[in-house]
Image (cartoon, grey):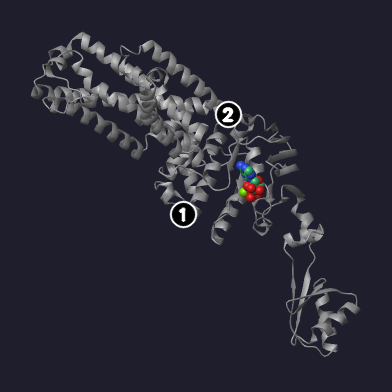
Amino acid sequence: MIRVVIAELRKLRRPTLLLGTIATVGGLSALFTSIIFLMIDSEDGNSRRGESIGPEELSQAMGLVYGFRLVGAFLGIVALCIFASQTAQEYSLGTLRNLLVRQPSRMKILAGKFISMKIFALVMVLFAGALSILISFALAERAGVNTSAWTTSAAIELLFRSTLNIFIATLCFGTFGMILGLLLRSPISAIAVGVLWILILENILGALIKSTGKWLPGFNFSNLGEGGIPSLSYRHSIAVSLAYLVIGGAIAAVFFKRRDVAN
Amino acid sequence: MEKTAISTSDLTKIYGERAALSHGNFVVPNGSICGFVGPNGSGKTTTIRMLLGLIAPTSGTATVLGESISHPEKYLPHVGAMIEGPAFYPALSGRENLKVLAELGGFPLSRVDQLLEKVDLADRGGSKFKTYSLGMKQRLGIAAALLPNPKLLILDEPTNGLDPSGIQEVRGIIKDLADSGTTVFVSSHILSELEMICEYLIMLREGRVIFSGRTQELLSGQKPIIVAKPEYDVDLTNLAKKLTDSGFKISIVDGSLHIEAAQEASATINRMAFEAGITLASISVVLPTLEETFFEMTGDSK
Ligand SMILES: Nc1ncnc2c1ncn2[C@@H]1O[C@H](COP(=O)(O)OP(=O)(O)O)[C@@H](O)[C@H]1O
Ligand SMILES: [Mg+2]
């Protein structure tokens, strides 16, 4: 299985994919973090959905990770797209047959792909986090934010916890993408279904029937990234997310194992 | 060592109502080059996919290198395969594509450059796969199949899309491998591409195995034909009658007489024409292709 991981990482580190992902993730991270600090006095708000966050709040320990957590919400979508297409393309390109001739154990292929995805997601999250924190420090003074609370042990602990939560959320989205890729076998449809579902359908459903939000996968994955919110506990989201991913993963794995590889 | 590289027993794959392969029984002896021939859609690729564990047979069984196809992990480490239409990652170079498969199979990465050299891709190994011509893609596929230094090499239509010199090269590679002891199972929809290099042939038609045996068996059934063309078309029927009266089996094709007879008979035929006052514009001996011979033998016309 370690061989599968090594081979998968070779595909994932090809320049266009790696640099493209770094550019996207870095761009998002730089954009969101900069907006928070540069537009701190703006009437239009400097945080999500037109909300505002001022220098006093940012001067506290959570100011260190505020930008990172905002970006975290988007890393999931990036992971979903990458892993949906990375799995589905093995079918659409016909390369799955080569993989299976060299490694006939389909479960090893799947496990190796999953582990390499984890590694890639971790790199993505760490990069976005490091960039966001660098930018935060660089822009803090200019925005009238005092960074002395950012270097306390409380802030460091918050940083670790946020990184872990964002990593878990990114993994959930990435796994969701892999499941869609395995089931749909076409990169375009897997990405389209995944993104439409997460960004549009869940919002419509959540708005129509308030209580559904608690049970939708995307909301719960995002909630894990936030570390839980008052109306939706972290524990609840862990349980719901696991249920979706374990059941979805099992169905996808059975299909992957049994289905003829005829293209 | 096993005597047979591949052996199938009533191997069957049904798609919906249609049998892509129906009760396929054949044997590929070890150490030989065996051709797998049939028109497009006759079931070659389907059979090969079953032998590689990619699709499950509807019924029947097969063994590859002595192991059942229900346990492909037991024999695939010794098998190299290229399935119809080489498939690689378009954004990776040929070299990177081979490295992915080498890592997956646990083969030394040093083999990659040796193989690129072998299939004449050394100078283009760094270019992206999507920039390759069909011939180059085909050769990369062959290189990938050679990664494990296989005991059994399965090539599905390796000459598709190649020009005559490319076909020649592939034949050369196959012969070299066979000389070094590798069993080669190679498919094509054109028999004439394979008949020269294959010791054994398996012929497939509409999902059925219609011939399985030594190429020699087919060759010995090959009857030469003498083609004679009179100078004037009006003499055609006259000459035809004379020859039939003397016991020759003839048919008229495109203003020529096709006479089933060995080369030695051409002098006789020439003299008979001359005595009847007919001048022959040409007379020649041709060998029918194995394909024609085969359908002749089975009484199957196509
Ligand atoms: N995945 C599939 N689903 C349905 N029919 C198929 C599938 N694969 C092949 N077939 C059918 O099986 C027959 C044999 O195909 P194939 O094995 O590709 O032939 P060949 O390789 O000799 O050209 C064809 O009629 C083809 O249409
Ligand atoms: Mg075919």
Which residue carries the number 1 mark?
B133
Whether B285 is drawn above or below A140: the answer is: below
> In what quadrant of the picture does the C terminus of chain B appear?
bottom right
The structure residue drawn at horizontal position 67% and vertical position 33%, both measured from the top left corner, is: B69
Q: Is residue A131 among the parts visible in the rendering?
A: no
Q: Is residue A261 among the parts visible in the rendering?
A: yes
Helix, strand or loop at mark 2 = helix
The structure residue drawn at horizontal position 46% and vertical position 50%, both measured from the top left corner, is: B121
Q: Left of A196 or right of it: where is B37?
A: right
Helix, strand or loop at mark 1 = loop
Displayed quadrant of residue B163: bottom right
Which disc, if any, is residue B223? none
> In what quadrant of the picture does the N terminus of chain B appear?
top right
**Numbered disc in front, either 2 or 1:** 2
Whether A61 is drawn above or below A143: the answer is: above
Q: Left of A198 or right of it: where is B227?
A: right
- Farthest residue to the bottom: give it: B277
Q: Left of A17 or right of it: where is A246?
A: right
Which residue carries the number 2 mark?
A257
